[in-house]
Image (cartoon, rainbow, N blue to C red):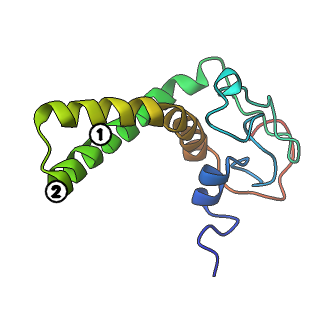
Amino acid sequence: MNILPKGSKLYSIFKYKCPRCHQGDVFKSKSSYNLPKMFDMHEQCSNCELRYEFEPGFFYGAMYVSYGLTVALGVATYVLMQMFFEASVAQIILVLVGVLIVGSPLVLRLSRIIWMNLFIKYEPEKRGVNK
């Protein structure tokens, strides 16, 4: 049993694959923590030729997804710190800052791929530049 079967949105999101064919890579670097190349994206899918940026400013909407992921990460960190460590306010703030700094490259990449998956459906047989 595969937890992330090809054809699911989660496969595309967590493997950073093209949302339409699940074959081509979206980002040029495999690692979220290769900071100089963190946002370097291919212009189009190497398999189905889907252009990743449909229009100028397409990824501005990913800021909303990024905000939601960051809030979720912050709340989860706070709850875990309170439940398991009974930490003081200063300790919680220090850990929150650390988690958010370390997690931000991952959150930023995830927000872009989630944003793309909101608008593109899985159609592995389809080819061409855009929808």
Query: Dot 1: within a 10 Å radius of its alpha carbon, few (fewer than 14), some, or many (20 or more) residues?
Result: some
Q: Give the percent coordinates (x, y) of residue 45.
A: 82, 40
Q: Which residue in the protein does label 2 denote?
A: 83
Instruction: Name the kind of residue labelled 1 in the image.
Output: Gly
Q: Quadrant of residue 41?
A: top right
Instruction: Name the kind of residue labelled 2 in the image.
Output: Met
* Mark nearer the N terminus (2 vs 1): 1
From the viewer's perspective, tell me whether residue 6 is left or right of residue 68. Answer: right
Q: Residue at x 79, y 39 (%)?
A: 50
As drawn, 84 above or below 44 = below
Q: Quadrant of the C terminus?
A: top right
Q: Which residue in the protein does label 1 denote?
A: 74
Q: Residue at x 60, y 50 (%)?
A: 13
Q: Residue at x 29, y 39 (%)?
A: 74
Query: Dot 2: within a 10 Å radius of its alpha carbon, few (fewer than 14), some, or many (20 or more) residues?
Result: few
Q: Give residue 21's mark.
A: none
